[in-house]
Image: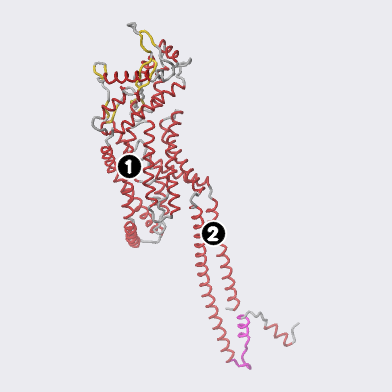
């Protein structure tokens, strides 16, 4: 052992300190690079991929009532720790998932149940006896009043081609008008769902069907050939055609009427061409079709307003509560799965990671893990309770509005969908505002994002409906395309809002995260440096003790030496080595004797 080893130990300490410092700086640079790079396209692809996976499972496997998507659950399981758990159900996080869940696919169990209830309570408004409507008096009075009103206000003209009224002689030689008062929505396809109607509501809705809101003036041949046109779709399961005329859109009705006119031949076709209902190619002109759509929309909206006035909202609420009760098992199961499964898998991974553990130790560790899981779930009971109440309330509201949506048509239906989404987002906004873990700026930012996503979702639905009407999209592609468009656009909106950082939240979080990274790495550096210093200090103390002992041994031997008989060469060599003096005693002795050449 020598003084040089002590010095070498000190040098090694400095070198290790330098390496630790460089490693800490490199790690800080890497993490700050990830934070500051803000790769828009990479985030968009990553977030879109996750959301698509979650939405596909939610829509095709009817998992909405669990209120947790498969991608969120997978990420929670993979990243779960008791100290820092990934919690997508917390306020203000993954808001797009909440907005996606405001609406279910038509194949969901709740919507199927709602549609079944409606179909079972469907009642035909106008019935025929001996080939004539039993309400013929109401019908004739309505038509007569409408015709007189048009004459009175000077608007007696064809509502589809804007030509003035013309007359002809009938078979009895009487002069009659060639403009017929036409029911926009045919009486033969008029139905109501009496499950949700007030008493005597049917009679008031019959009056609507024979009022100016459901009447237009149409050329007689067009009216006669239009007949009781129907809209049908093919059932994907049975392959049978289903009559959906009573809930068809204005565009579907206009297409059906146009198709009926365009298939006419002979004299009827010629009359429609002369009147302007068909062009030279036998096709319905765009202006006529546009007028058909406008009139159907007006009639359906007016009917929808009448139905909303005549709706028994107590019955709607009662059925909505029943649908909520049917879903409560899934809501509770979703909460238990969310909080128990990640903790169980986390504990199992910890046990299985130790390959040397035996059965006895494994059972002991399982018992300890079970205790931790129970304590963790117990600590979350209050959160679970509030989540169940929140999800139950939202399920009730969803069901309530879904019933109303399927009672009405056209623009009114779209407006109720918007109101439904706004009410649900308002509930989520209240939860965000009531959070104790967010700053006012973070709350404002989250609420603004939530409302932006809600409006975006509604606009996308309306836009997709318009595109669907313009392009014949196969039915099996509709839902996938809706999911893809909703996910991509929602994530674009989220990333744009994050980039804009209207409430300075991202900047504050970025600064806080940078500080956190530097503090963490500095703490790790100091801990590692302290460990190295402790090891080196212990080693230095051992070296010093050994050197002190060697010096003491040498001193004692030199005190006891006989200079006439004993050699001191060994002691001198030890001192030479101990203090690294590099003296060659053999050579020095020769020089002293004068025999060195």
Residue 225 found in image quarter: top left
Q: Nearer the viewer, residue 574 or 351?
A: 351
Would you call the spot at circle 1 few (<14 residues within 10 Å), some (14-19), or many (20 or more)? Answer: many
Taking the magenta stretch, the answer to whether it contains residue 552 is no
Taking the magenta stretch, the answer to whether it contains residue 568 is yes
For the N terminus, which image quadrant? bottom right
For the C terminus, which image quadrant? bottom right
Residue 203 falls left or right of residue 7: left
Element on which disc 2 rests = helix
Q: Nearer the viewer, residue 206 or 108?
A: 206
State the extent of the magenta-drawn residues as a range: 560-578
Residue 128 falls left or right of residue 226: left
Residue at 52% across / 46% down in the picture?
A: 42
**Residue 8: image tag:** none
Disc 2 marks which residue?
28
Residue 190: % across, % down: 31, 25
């Amino acid at each position: 052992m020598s003084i040089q080893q002590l010095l070498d130990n000190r040098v090694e300490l400095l070198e290790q300190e330098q390496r630790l410092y460089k490693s800490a700086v490199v790690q800080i640079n890497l993490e700050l690079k990830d934070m500051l790079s803000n790769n828009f396209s990479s985030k968009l692809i990553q977030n879109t991929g996750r959301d698509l996976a979650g939405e596909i499972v939610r829509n095709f496997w009817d998992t909405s009532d669990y209120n947790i998507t498969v991608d969120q659950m997978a990420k929670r399981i993979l990243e779960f720790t008791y100290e820092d758990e990934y919690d997508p159900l917390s306020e203000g996080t993954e808001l797009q998932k909440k907005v996606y869940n405001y609406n279910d696919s038509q194949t969901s169990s709740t919507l199927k149940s709602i549609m079944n209830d409606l179909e079972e309570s469907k009642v035909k408004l106008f019935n025929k006896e001996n080939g004539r409507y039993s309400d013929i008096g109401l019908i004739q009075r309505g038509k007569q009043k409408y015709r007189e009103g048009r004459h009175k206000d000077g608007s007696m003209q064809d509502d589809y081609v804007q030509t003035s009224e013309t007359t002809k002689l009938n078979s009895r030689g009487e002069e009659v008008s060639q403009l017929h008062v036409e029911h926009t929505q045919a009486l033969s396809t008029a139905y109501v769902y009496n499950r949700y109607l007030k008493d005597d509501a049917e009679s008031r809705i019959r009056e609507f069907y024979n009022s100016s809101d459901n009447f237009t003036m149409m050329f007689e041949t067009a009216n006669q050939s239009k007949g009781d046109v129907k809209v049908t779709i093919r059932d994907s399961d049975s392959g049978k055609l289903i009559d959906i005329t009573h809930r068809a859109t204005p565009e579907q009705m206009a297409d059906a009427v146009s198709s009926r006119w365009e298939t006419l031949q002979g004299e009827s076709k010629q009359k429609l061409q002369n009147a302007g209902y068909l062009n030279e190619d036998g096709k319905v002109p765009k202006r006529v079709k546009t007028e058909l759509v406008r009139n159907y929309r007006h009639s359906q909206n007016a009917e929808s307003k009448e139905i909303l006035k005549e709706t028994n909202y107590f019955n709607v609420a009662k059925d909505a509560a029943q649908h909520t009760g049917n879903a409560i098992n899934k809501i509770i199961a979703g909460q238990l799965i969310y909080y128990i499964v990640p903790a169980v898998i986390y504990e199992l991974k910890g046990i299985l990671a130790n390959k040397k553990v035996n059965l006895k130790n494994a059972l002991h560790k399982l018992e300890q893990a079970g205790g931790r899981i129970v304590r963790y779930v117990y600590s979350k009971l209050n959160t679970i309770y509030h989540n169940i109440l929140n999800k139950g309330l939202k399920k009730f509201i969803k069901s309530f509005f879904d019933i109303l949506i399927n009672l009405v048509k056209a623009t009114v239906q779209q407006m109720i969908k918007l109101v439904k989404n706004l009410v649900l987002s308002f509930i989520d906004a209240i939860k965000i505002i009531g959070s104790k873990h967010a700053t006012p700026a973070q709350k404002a930012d989250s609420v603004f994002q939530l409302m932006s996503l809600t409006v975006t979702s509604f606009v996308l639905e309306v836009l997709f409906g318009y595109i669907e009407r313009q392009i014949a999209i196969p039915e099996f592609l509709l839902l996938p395309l809706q999911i893809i468009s909703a996910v991509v656009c929602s994530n674009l909106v989220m990333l744009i809002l994050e980039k804009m950082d209207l409430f300075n939240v991202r900047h504050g979080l970025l600064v806080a995260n940078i500080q956190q990274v530097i503090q963490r790495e500095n703490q790790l550096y100091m801990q590692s440096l302290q460990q190295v210093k402790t090891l080196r200090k212990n080693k230095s103390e051992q070296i010093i003790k050994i050197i002190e002992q060697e010096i003491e041994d040498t001193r004692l031997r030199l005190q006891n030496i006989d200079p006439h008989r004993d050699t001191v060469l060994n002691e001198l060599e030890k001192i030479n080595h101990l203090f690294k003096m590099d003296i060659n005693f053999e050579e020095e002795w020769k020089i002293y004797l004068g025999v060195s050449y």
